[in-house]
Image (cartoon, rainbow, N blue to C red):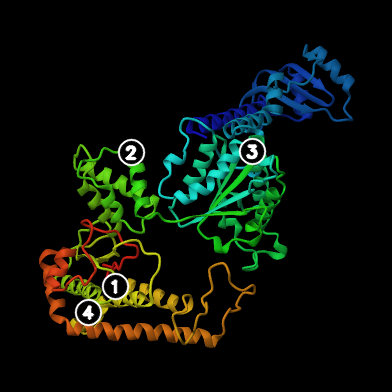
Amino acid sequence: MGPVWIAAVIGLLALNYWIGQQATEGPSRVRIPYSPVFLQKVNEGKVAEITSKGTTIQGTFTAKERYQGSAPTNRFETEIPAFADTKALSQLLESKRVVVNAVPLDTGTPWWEGVLIGFGPTLLLLGLLFLLIRRAGNMQNALGSFGRSRAVRYQPGGGRVTFADVAGIDEAKAELSEIVDFLRNPEKYRRLGGRIPHGVLLAGAPGTGKTLLARAVAGEANVPFFSMAASEFVEAIVGVGASRVRDLFEQAKAAAPSIVFIDELDAIGRSRASGISGFGGSDEREQTLNQILTEMDGFDPSTNVIVVAATNRVDVLDEALTRPGRFDRRVIVQPPDRNGREAILKVHTRHVPLAPDVNLGRIAAATPGMVGADLANLVNEAALLAARRGHEKVEMADFTDAMERIVLGAERKVMMTAEDRRRTAYHEAGHAIVGMMTEGADPVRKISIIPRGLALGVTFSAPEGDRYNYEYRELVARINVALGGRAAEEIVFGQPTTGAESDIQQLTEIARHMVGRWGMSEAVGPLAVIPRDGAGPLLPGAAEVSEHTQELVDAEVRRIVESAHVEVVSLLRANRHRLDALTQALLDRETLDEDEAYEVAGVSRNGHGRANGHLRAVARSTADVRQSQR
């Protein structure tokens, strides 16, 4: 409610209060005793008229009088005692020519004031409620909106999304083409006894285009599309989520053929066996999940409503969701390969003016691990950078600098001491030398001691192409590279600093996964001893593995890391001259690209091959996040 409405409400309340005060109080009168004051005034001829009702007398004096310190007034009132001689009083009044009125007592309240006093507050309250309801929409919305579905409905129209707007995930599009064909020609399948899946589950990493793909299915079929995030179903009030599910499916069935899209399904679809979330299974999340299962089971073959859901975590979903008859078709949306990334870049640059030197193939090759959302962000950052530089078209240099900004972070102006700068240079040079000389490590693409984001320096490594698997030696190489910065500080300065925090976190995670998930430890064997998220034991405090096994895992992780540390320290001591040369080059130039780094260190590529482009994005970089508050 705006300031004008607030002022109006306050004004109405003040007016109602003033009128009520004036009406209820009436004109002021002085109260006098019946005897001797009233009778004496009558005998003296000072009473002009009276009005009587019952034993109450109100009247006026011929002139203003004072009584016991009251203000001068000609209006008075008194009470006739029950034992008084009213006949003698009547004769006295007639003899003194006092006007006697046979009308009701003067209450001082006109009829319209009585109505206002009686109904004013109620009318004012109703008026306020009316204004509030109008602002909320109507009474039904104000009182019943909790149970209404908040799904956004996208109608077929000129702005629809089709498969032409989706690139790089051809396998997923091919699987969904059957859904599109069913929505267009349902009788083609029904006459042969076929039944389209009730639900389609899109699974994949964040940013791979699951939501875009679902909208494209609706656009291709030219049907209404109801979109809602799973978390929007859940409220603090138990039962609201289930009510919203019912309302959503009622809307979808009324608009059939249609598509219901539920994003982030794992928000309500997590396994009910992973823990106790409520006594008797009656908590809000479980009720919402049960209602979704009920609605999908209630579909008959003639219901042209398809439920499409997206999730990043298929492994934590309840089994009841993925069984046949519900989400019985699963489409895996994988990160795009090189050709897929190039196709995605072509889609996102359709309306971007590109300079002749822009090579989308080179950009695609330089971005392994990036998904559709990352590439869209890259194009947008390059366009913004070109606009800031005053370019007429987006140039290749704009894409290169935008890629550095996204992957490495924006440059920061930090006043570093000469000692901190030297320590940072040795730290990054240690990462680089180990990466250059360790078999199985990714080639070093760039080294910099320019502060970016939270990092004071960055050593950037990336593989030649897309990677889908890692060997044991390659994982150990990643651990070695992560230890390179800390080992270099120990060799040169005699003690480490807090700058290796992110390196330690990364190498610890790799080592624990090697032992606990990937079966790369002879002592533990091919066993999965680290529980998956959402798949823990039923009872709180219970463990999936024994305490002895946990101790064994910790010991194996320590063995792998300590063995790698000894190897890295030995390698850097044997190549101290390369470490010093690379550090001095960083202090002089601050940033070294791939060719410069290998040339300064005096290391050959050893089959690594030459980099394709000025900078390659990293699937898992060895960026050194160094806190500036050291």
Q: How many marks?
A: 4
Which sits in the foreground, 476 or 150?
476
Q: Is residue 547 above or below residue 137?
A: below
On residue 425, the disc is: none
Crowd rating for badge 1 (residues with CA inside 10 Å; few <14, some 14–19, many 20+) = many
Give how far apart the Cα atoms at labels 3 and 1 are. Answer: 55 Å
Choose the circle earlier in sequence order: 2 or 3.
3
Whether label 3 touches label 1, CB < 8 Å: no
Residue 313 shows in the view:
yes
**Which residue corresponds to the image point at 65% horizontal and 39% vertical from the top-left?**
304
Name the residue tied to disc 4.
489
Name the residue tied to disc 1.
441
Give how far apart the Cα atoms at labels 2 and 4 are. Answer: 49 Å
Q: Secondary structure at mark 4?
A: helix
Q: Is residue 336 above or below residue 300?
A: below
Q: Which quadrant of the structure image shows residue 559?
A: bottom left
Name the residue tied to disc 2.
350
